[in-house]
Image: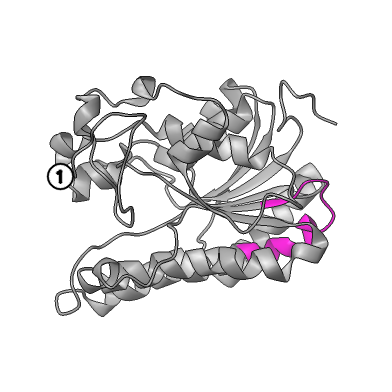
Amino acid sequence: MASTAAPLAGKTIIMSGGSRGIGLAIALRAARDGANLAIIAKTTEPHPKLEGTIHTAAKEIEDAGGTALPIVGDVRDDESVASAVAQTVERFGGIDIVVNNASAIDLSGTESLSMKKYDLMQDINCRGTFLLGKTSIPHLRKAENPHILTLSPPLTLDPKWYSGHLGYTLAKFGMSMTTLAWAREFAGDGIAANSLWPRTLIATAAVRNLLGGEAALQRSRKPEIYADAAHAILKRPSRSCTGNFYLVEDVLAEEGVTDFSGYGYGGDDTQLQVDIYVEELAAQGKAVTA
């Protein structure tokens, strides 16, 4: 059994995406414990607007102290996901944790959203999450402290989160509905299902390329804040820690973190931007503007 100093040591995590950004940060945090990381991603060659590939991510994981299994695959494809799960089990002997990280974003309104983009978001976000979780369940049943962590927002029926970007909301809330369902469906198996979402923008390629460039990054926090919160959840007992829609900052506050200033991307910590699907933001007593 892993020591309390390294709670994820020897644990096997299978993650959709993970070449960069939040997924990679979560993988690197687990790697520092000595975890095994199987990452399923499509990026094999450098992209002018996207840092990192599945191969550079694997090297960073190994350098951080983990064991990496980079799997070139597509979370939208049944055979690709089945193969990724099989490779992970063959290499590491099982699966302890599933992280549903892969996601596509387009905030266009109903009339301007192309059906190609609509289908892409549904296939990656909602279907991909369902597929990876479904395929991993038989192996999670055998794990000591099995977790499914999905990077998706708290569910709500407030129409303001639907009307401006319905396609994206349907895809992200579809991910969150798997948490709601799996927490109940697999409670008897002791498999935890939780969602995790940040109160602020997180400095990722999506924020840079789609949501406002460098100015938006300056209103964001580093991916490491997401990674530290994910790590805190994944070490909790799966039978009692399930069915939650966590906000990143709340998880860290529960862990005793009182100062988030070290997670700032570089801008004024009082000007952080509230993320979508979040009603308010109280950053440890600091006023934050939307």
In the displayed structure, does residue 197 sit left or right of residue 280?
A: right
Q: What residue did someone put label 1 on?
A: 212
Q: Nearer the viewer, residue 277 or 65?
A: 277
Q: Amino acid at mark 1?
A: Gly
Q: Nearer the viewer, residue 168 or 119?
A: 168
Q: Which residues are magenta?
A: 133-147
Task: Measuring from the top left, give residue 230's x and y in whole percent.
Answer: 55, 40
Task: Measuring from the top left, give residue 256's x and y in whole percent.
Answer: 55, 25
Q: Residue at x 16, y 34 (%)?
A: 214
Q: Is residue 227 magenta?
A: no
Q: Taking the image as drawn, is residue 20 in sight?
A: no
Q: In which quadrant will I find the C terminus? A: top left
Vertical arrangement, residue 267 with respect to residue 40, above or below: above
In the displayed structure, does residue 114 sit left or right of residue 147?
A: left
Callout 1: few (<14), some (14-19), or many (20+) C-alpha neighbours within 10 Å? few
**Which image quarter: residue 9?**
top right
Q: Nearer the viewer, residue 163 or 36?
A: 163
Q: Is residue 139 magenta?
A: yes
Q: What color scheme is it?
A: one colour
Q: Residue at x 20, y 69 (%)?
A: 164
Q: Residue at x 44, y 59 (%)?
A: 154
Q: Secondary structure at mark 1?
A: loop
Task: Measuring from the top left, give residue 195's x and y in whole percent.
Answer: 53, 54
Q: Taking the image as drawn, is residue 224 in sight?
A: yes
Task: Measuring from the top left, give residue 250's x and y in whole percent.
Answer: 48, 39
Q: Residue at x 22, y 73 (%)?
A: 163
Vertical arrangement, residue 281 with respect to residue 252, above or below: below
In the displayed structure, does residue 206 sit left or right of residue 28?
A: left
